[in-house]
Every structure is written in structure tokens, then in C-alpha cells.
Image (spheres, rainbow, N blue to C red):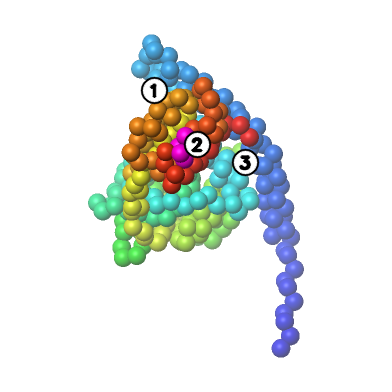
């Protein structure tokens, strides 16, 4: 039996491939400069928060700016992942917890004419993925539902678990999707929105992420009666808390605090030092140290000197260098 010849690429598929390749090149060329701008915005917002007499309103605004820069950074990462097929490392996600933390953001995006309701599972719902990707899934589905309700309406977000699966559902009572278009909505660059109102990337990105997580996404809709997107994902157990003692040597307070909080959330005991001398003092006073996380350049010295003192006192400890320099 002879092998069948490969089918020639259709003009539509070739055009789509060229557009994706162009988008990939464009994304790679602008992300560096865009991230530099985000760093400036982030830094000035942090400087505002350090002002001792900052009003509560300005403090809240600066905090929101920080959150927005983080989401923008996640978005650039997702754009690169989408165009280059490069996946971030997966973690165990608490779907209910993430949705709760996003609620105020979602309500601001929806405005006063759209009601957002949560119907979350009473039991914990865990899946394997990446936090930034989950945020992109939810944002795209919510914005898509909002745009389908130009005069307002109601969106319901639900979670549940059943056997080996967990479910995330977003339902609206908007205009719905015509039956003849339902099979196209997850295609890259396909959109029913007017020019300038949509890129056609959002739902395609959602579909890519869900498939990458080993899940499926389905849509059920009737014109004039809304749409319901149902995501099914493999269920996982919550991540076990870690243990051990870590010394974080970093002279930038904001960076050191961020690292400490992230490690403590994972169950580690964390000791801090803002200079070489302080780090060495902690090393000599600690009964156990499993890991040193140190900046290469420290106030009053450097991380390599701290490493030497650490291994002399705690030979089995490991070292992780960090730096703001390339």
C-alpha cells in the first residue's frame, strides 16, 4: 500500500500560519522594551508606597498600579508562550482561591451594568497549571461575556469537582453565538466583533492553555439566550507544604520581603539579612540552614563571601545566587 501524499496547505491555513509567525516576531521585538516600561511604572508605584504621609486613596491607587503591572507582565509572557509554544512551569492551582482574589478586578472591568455572581464549590478545587495562565483564561472569558451584553446582564462563574475532574464554568445571558459560528470561535484571529474591538486571539489563547493543561473546553449557546463555556480539567491533590530553613540575603527590602512571603506560603522557615555582615551573623546563630538565597552584590560585601561562611558552618546547605544584572 503506498503512502498518501501530504495534503497541500490551503490558502487560508497558509495565511493564518504567516500571521502567527509575524505575531511571534513582533512579540519578541517589543516585549523587551515593554517590560522595561513596566519596570519603571512598577518602581515609581513602589516609591509612592514608601512615602510616609501618603493618603489612603493614593496608597490604594499605587497598590492597584502594582497589580496592573504584574498582570501586564503576565500578559506579555502569555503572548510569548502563545507564539513560541513555550509553556511556563506548572504548579498546583487553587481555582476557588484565585477566583476570589480576582473578583474586585473583574467587577471593575464589567462596570455597573453587568452583575457578576460566583457559585463556587464548597469543596476545594485544585488543578495543575500556571497562575498567570489561569488569570488569562478567566479574564478572556469574562471580557468575552461582557462584550456579548452591550446593554448589561449577568455573568455566573461556577466551579465544581466530580471524580477525577474539576470544572470551571462561565455563563452569561447575552446575545449568544450563532450556531454556524460556534465551531470557529477558538480559531486564531477569528472574531465577530467590529474592527478595532477585538483581535480574535483571546478565545484561541484560552483553548491553547486548556489543551496544554490536559483539559477540554466546550461552548453551549443559543442566539439571544446567552452562552456557557465549560472547562474540564484533571483534578489534582493540593500541594504538600514544604519544610526546611532558608536564609534570604538581599539588600533590596521589597525584593527580600517578596521572596520571604512566597517561601513562607510554601511552608519554609525563612531568615532574612540585608547585608553581608547581617547574613554572616545569622549563619553563625542558626542551628540549621538548608538553603541560602543571596544576591551577588550585597550591602557591605557580596554573596560569594556569604556562601563561604555558610558552607563552613553548614556543609550540607545549598546556595542559589540571584541578581538584577544580566
Q: Which residue is mark 1?
A: 60
Q: Is residue 255 above or below residue 216?
A: above
Q: The C terminus lies in which quarter of the figure?
A: top right
Main SS of the magenta part reads: helix
Helix, strand or loop status at disc 2:
helix
Q: Which mark is residue 307?
A: 2
Q: Which mark is nearer the camera, 1 or 3?
A: 1
**Nearer to the camera, 324 or 147:** 324
How would you rate the neighbour count of disc 2 (Cα within 10 Å): few for under 14, some for 14-19, many for 20 or more?
many
Tell me residue 271's x, y (percent): 37, 33
Helix, strand or loop status at disc 1:
helix
- Residue bounds of the magenta highlight: 308-312
Left or right, 103 with reference to 150:
left
Q: Is residue 104 visible?
A: no
Q: Which mark is residue 195?
A: 3
Work out whether mark 2 precedes mark 3 in sequence or the reverse, and give the earlier one.
3
Q: Which mark is residue 167?
A: none
Helix, strand or loop status at disc 3:
loop
Amino acid at each position: 500500500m503506498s503512502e498518501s501524499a501530504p495534503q497541500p496547505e490551503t490558502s487560508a491555513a497558509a495565511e493564518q500560519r504567516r500571521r502567527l509567525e509575524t505575531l511571534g516576531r513582533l512579540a519578541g521585538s517589543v516585549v523587551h522594551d515593554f517590560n522595561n516600561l513596566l519596570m519603571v511604572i512598577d518602581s515609581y508605584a513602589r516609591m509612592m508606597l514608601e512615602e510616609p504621609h501618603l493618603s489612603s486613596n493614593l496608597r490604594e491607587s499605587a497598590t492597584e498600579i502594582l497589580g496592573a503591572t504584574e498582570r501586564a507582565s503576565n500578559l506579555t509572557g502569555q503572548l510569548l508562550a502563545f507564539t513560541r509554544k513555550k509553556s511556563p512551569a506548572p504548579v498546583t492551582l487553587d481555582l476557588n482561591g484565585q477566583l476570589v482574589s480576582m473578583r474586585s478586578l473583574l467587577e471593575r472591568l464589567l462596570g455597573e451594568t453587568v452583575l457578576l455572581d460566583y457559585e463556587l464549590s464548597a469543596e476545594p478545587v485544585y488543578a495543575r497549571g500556571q497562575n498567570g495562565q489561569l488569570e488569562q483564561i478567566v479574564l478572556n472569558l469574562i471580557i468575552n461575556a461582557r462584550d456579548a451584553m452591550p446593554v448589561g446582564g449577568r455573568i455566573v462563574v461556577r466551579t465544581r469537582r466530580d471524580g477525577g475532574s474539576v470544572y470551571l464554568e462561565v455563563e452569561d445571558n447575552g446575545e449568544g453565538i450563532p450556531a454556524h459560528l460556534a465551531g470557529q470561535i477558538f480559531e486564531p484571529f477569528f472574531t465577530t466583533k467590529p474592527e478595532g474591538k477585538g483581535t480574535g486571539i483571546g478565545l484561541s489563547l484560552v483553548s491553547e492553555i486548556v489543551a496544554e493543561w490536559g483539559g477540554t473546553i466546550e461552548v453551549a449557546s443559543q442566539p439571544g439566550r446567552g452562552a456557557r463555556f465549560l472547562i474540564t480539567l484533571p483534578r489534582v491533590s493540593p500541594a504538600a507544604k514544604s519544610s526546611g530553613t532558608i536564609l534570604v540575603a538581599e539588600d533590596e527590602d521589597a525584593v527580600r520581603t517578596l521572596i520571604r512571603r512566597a517561601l513562607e506560603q510554601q511552608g519554609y522557615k525563612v531568615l532574612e539579612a540585608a547585608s553581608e555582615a547581617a547574613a554572616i551573623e545569622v549563619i553563625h546563630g542558626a542551628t540549621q540552614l538548608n538553603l541560602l538565597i543571596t544576591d551577588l552584590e550585597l550591602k557591605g560585601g557580596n554573596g560569594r563571601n556569604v556562601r563561604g561562611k555558610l558552607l563552613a558552618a553548614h556543609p550540607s546547605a545549598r546556595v542559589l545566587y540571584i541578581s538584577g544584572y544580566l
